[in-house]
Amino acid sequence: MSGRRGAQGRDDRPSGLDRQIDRLEDRRASKEDARAAGDLKGQRARSSAEKLLTRSTSGAIYAVVTLACLFIGPLTTTVLIAAEAWLCCSEFFRICRMGGRTPNDAFGLAAALLFPLAAYANGLLALTLVIFVLLMACAVWYVLTPRASIADVAVTAFGPLYTSLAFSSIVLIRMYDHGPAGALLALGVMLSIWGNDATAYFVGSAIGAHKLAPRISPSKSVEGFVGGIAGSVAVWALVSAFLVPELDMALAVACGLVVGVASVFGDLFESRIKRGAGVKDSGNLIPGHGGLLDRSDSMLFGGMAAFFLLRFGGIL
C-alpha cells in the first residue's frame, strides 16, 4: 500500500517539462503589464523601426515633390509654396484657437494664398501691397465686429505674415533665374536648412549633453546646435563650390552661419507656440512628421534670412 502511495506521489509531482512550462508562464505573466504598455524591448525596437520607415517614406515623397516643382519652373514652385503656406497658416490658426484666440480665417487664409502669388507676379512691391490690404481688412473687421478682440486681430494678421510671407522667400529666390540656375540656388537654400536639422539631430543624439532650451524643446542640445550650424555651413560651401559660382566663399560661410541660427530659432519659435497651446504637433498631415508647419518651421525664418543675405550680397 505504502509503495503504491509513493508511486502515486511521484506521479503527482510535475515533470521537468511541466516545470519549464510553468516558469515560462510565470515569466510571461510578469511581463504582461509591460507588454500591454508596449514597453518590451522587441516592441520598442519594432515601434522605432516602423516610425523611422514612416518618417523616411513621407519625407522622401515630400522631397521628390519639392524637387520636381523647383526644376519644372518658377510657376510650379509658386503653386507648391502657396499650397504649403495656406496649410501652414491653417495649422497656425488651429493652434491659436486651441489657445483661446478667434482669428478671422477668411482674411488670414486668403492672404496666405496671395503672398506667394504676389512674389511671383511682382516681387517685393506686390508683397507690400498684400501686407497693406491684409492690415486694412483686419482694421475694417475690428471696427465692424464688436465681439472681435485686438488679440484676434493680431493673430489674424500675424498668421499669414509668419507662415506665408516668410515662405514666399523661396519663390523670390527661385526667381533668381527661370532656368536650372534658379532651381539650384533655391535647392541649395533648402538643403542647407534640411542639413542643419539632420546634422543637429544626429550630433545631439550622439553626444548631446547640455540642453539648449529645456523649457521649450527638451530634446535640443548645445552640441546639436553647433553640429547643425556646421552642417549648414558645409552645405553652403558646397553650393558656392559646385552649384552657384557667383556665390563667393565668404558670403557662403556667412549664409551658413546666419541661416543656420535663424532656422533653429524658427524651430524653437514654433515649439514655443505649440507649448503655449498645449499641443504636441501642429497637425497630422505628414505621417511621422506631424503637421506641415512642424516640417516647415525652420524653412520660414531660414529662407527669409537666406533671401536677405543673397539680396544684400548681390546674388539676387
Image (spheres, rainbow, N blue to C red):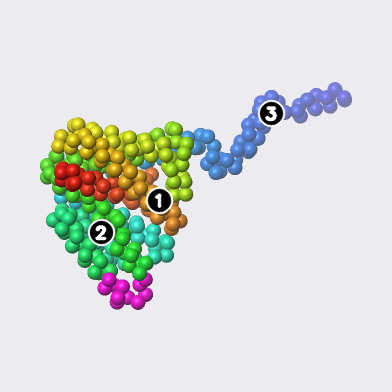
Magenta stretch holds residue 151: no
Q: Nearer the viewer, mark 1 or mark 3?
A: 1
Q: Earlier in the sequence, mark 2 or mark 3?
A: 3
Q: Tell me residue 118's x, y (percent).
A: 17, 57
Q: CA distance from mark 1 to mark 3?
A: 54 Å
Q: CA distance from mark 2 to mark 1?
A: 21 Å
Count every numbered label the image shows and give the total: 3
Badge 1 is on which residue? 271
Answer with left or right where residue 139 lies relative to residue 207. left
Q: Residues within 10 Å of mark 3 (few under 14, many from 20)?
A: few
Q: Is residue 278 above or below residue 175?
A: below
Q: Secondary structure at mark 1?
A: helix
| Residue 19: image tag | 3
Q: Amino acid at mark 1?
A: Ser
Q: Nearer the viewer, mark 2 or mark 1?
A: 1
Q: CA distance from mark 2 to mark 3?
A: 69 Å
Q: Amino acid at mark 3?
A: Arg
Q: Earlier in the sequence, mark 1 or mark 3?
A: 3
Residue at the (40%, 55%) spot, across then down: 273
Q: Which residues are drawn in magenta? A: 139-149
Q: Quadrant of the C terminus?
A: top left
Q: Quadrant of the N terminus?
A: top right
Q: Is residue 50 visible?
A: no
| Residue 112: image tag | 2
